Amino acid sequence: MHKSHYILLLLLAMVSCRYFDKKEETNPNLLIQELQRTDQAFSDFSKTNGMRKAFMEFIEDDGVMMRDNSMPLRGAPAIEYITNMNDSAVVLTWEPMGGDVAASGELGYTYGVYELKDSVNIQKGSYVTIWKKKDGKWKFVLDSGNQGLE
């Protein structure tokens, strides 16, 4: 084989590697829908399995939770807070109303309304959750809510 054939084969190999290495372009609207489905799945998991298990399933390892009358809880303290929740007498559900995803497809947010029911009361409010996509799976990195909706 001539030297020019080797160079041509090398160039073809390099071009094909770049072709297969190219990341798939993603439709932003599809990412937003995917994130809202994840948020809805989070709520459904809470309804079926309890809010403690749901939050443990969907929190990122260093996730932050903002709660009334409390400093922000991050990482281990947030997880400890979740694991100590007594959710046997309450049901927490929510409904995503909107959100957005960064152009990178790795960070996004959802917002909506929630309802917390116990045997006597129903508390309603709004929430915002910030999500991070890691290893193809959305996990929340910040969760916060406000009470007071009727």
Image: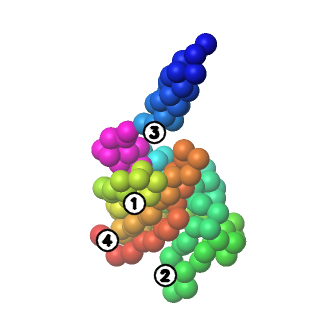
**CA gap, disc 1 to disc 2?**
20 Å
Residue 29 colored in magenta in the image: yes
Residue at numbered disc 2 = 68
The kind of secondary structure element at disc 2 is: loop
Magenta segment's dominant SS is helix
What is the CA distance from the residue labelled 3 to the residue labelled 2?
42 Å
Do the CB atoms of the residues marked 1 and 4 lie less than 8 Å apart? Answer: no
The residues tagged by marks 1 and 4 sit, at their Cα atoms, a distance apart of 21 Å
Rendering coords of residue 140 (x, y %):
52, 60
Q: Which residues are magenta?
A: 25-36
Q: Measure the C-alpha gap from mark 3 to mark 4.
A: 43 Å
Q: Earlier in the sequence, mark 1 or mark 3?
A: 3
Mark 3 is on which residue type?
A: Lys
Q: Which mark is residue 23?
A: 3
- Label for residue 149? 4
Q: Residues within 10 Å of mark 1 (few under 14, many from 20)?
A: many
The mark closer to the camera, 1 or 4, is 1
Occupied quadrant, residue 109? bottom left
Q: Are there few (<14), some (14-19), or many (20+) residues within 10 Å of tag 2?
A: few
Mark 3 residue crowding within 10 angstroms, few (<14) / some (14–19) / many (20+): few
Q: Secondary structure at mark 1?
A: strand
Is residue 124 a member of the stretch shown in magenta? no
Residue at image position (37%, 69%) is 125
The amino acid type of the residue labelled 4 equals Leu
